[in-house]
Amino acid sequence: MKSWIDGYDARDWQTATEGEIRYALLGLGWWTIDVALPAIESSDLGTATVLVSSSTDKAERLADENDVSRGISYDEFHEGEASEEYDAVYVGTPNAYHLEYVETAADLGKAVLCEKPMEASVERAERMVEACESADVALMIAYRMQTDPAVRRARELIEDGFLGDPVSVYGHNSQPLLEMIPDPDQWRLDPDVSGYGTSVMDLGIYSINTARYLLRREAVAVESRMASRHEAFSEVPDERASTMIAFEDDVQMVSTSSQNAHSDTQLTITGTEGQVELRPAFHGDATLHLSRGDVSVTVDHDGFDAEQEMEAEFDYFADRLLGDGDIYPDGRHGLADMHIIEAIHDSADSGETIEP
């Protein structure tokens, strides 16, 4: 077992050692201010120079509080205000508002790091990809798990044959949303803003995308069931959801998610020779457990909380802009997840197996 876990480089993706990307941050909620902004400022290759919000006053106030040079409104952003002061944009608004800001960024020739899921629908996500491709600007989707050391180590082990042939995957992601944000009118429970639903869009996507990243296989068929029982979830179909996904080479996945359950995250991939488990998996401090034959070990990494995951994500993105590496979770990669999520909801509606 020791030979499988020695010699790991946590930043095996790095190609650039100098340079700096200046960011404009859009959508100044708690995640952007409390997680993304500190992550940029502690990163090696980036700095935040512009904050963008619903009003100039709010943006300027938050810029002053966080030692950022400029604060502008969304309208000013669309008009190109301060565009000479940043190289790339980070879009952290609710899902249904991503497209308009990505289109403007593309028109301004700015690279884009956009939060997941890409948008509220496949059609709008396709428009995002087309806008960036037409303008020849980079588009990366913010899958922070792909730069987490535990996940990258798992990917390397799977590629090296630790599992043998992959057979099955189980992924789960749940949280008590109304305890975390005690507001039944929040945007995650509004399908006009969140998109197809709430649990799969916001939580299930972690299991699905991380499985795709680790296995390098795409979904070919989806079967799903959903239910919403709590009155706060009356407008969305998936307070709780379960899905079976068939990947290429007949790898079978079961994914469960809920926005109204005890907090738990896990991802287990079982093969013909071994097993890789991430538990906890998706919300900081991902821990890697390995089993092969009669031996089981836990692989220690320096603890990665959400801010550290975001720091690595921003450095990865900047590295791809400054160096010579390709972006793996690009717009087309994110669009595949949107097709899977759409298929999951279509299957729950129809009771049929759907091809993404």
Image: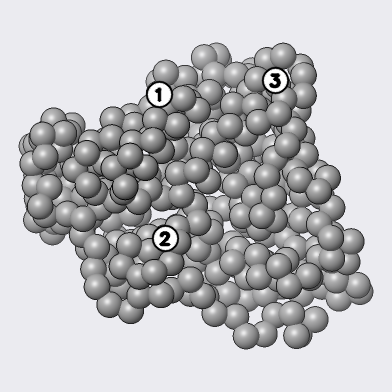
Whole-percent x, y for residue 131 in the image: 33, 36
Quarter of the picture containing the C terminus is top right
Q: Residues within 10 Å of mark 2 (few under 14, many from 20)?
A: many
| Distance between mark 2 and mark 1 Cα atoms | 25 Å
The residue type indicated by label 3 comes to Ala
How far separated are the C-alphas under marks 2 and 3?
A: 33 Å
Residue plotted at (28% across, 30% down): 100
User: Which residue lies at the image location 65% right of the left edge and 65% below the top edge?
Assistant: 155
**Mark 1 → mark 3, Cα distance in angstroms:** 20 Å
Where residue 48 appears, as percent x and y from the top left, is: 21, 58
Label at residue 313: 2
Q: Name the residue under label 1.
A: 193
Q: Name the residue under label 3.
A: 348
Figure check: 313 above or below 2: above
Q: Counting residues from the N terminus, which is met first, the one under dot 2 or under dot 1?
A: 1
* Residue 304 in the image: above or below residue 87: below
Q: Do the residues labelled 2 and 3 touch (CB within 8 Å)?
A: no
**CB atoms of marks 1 and 3 within 8 Å:** no
* Front residue (pair 1, 121): 121
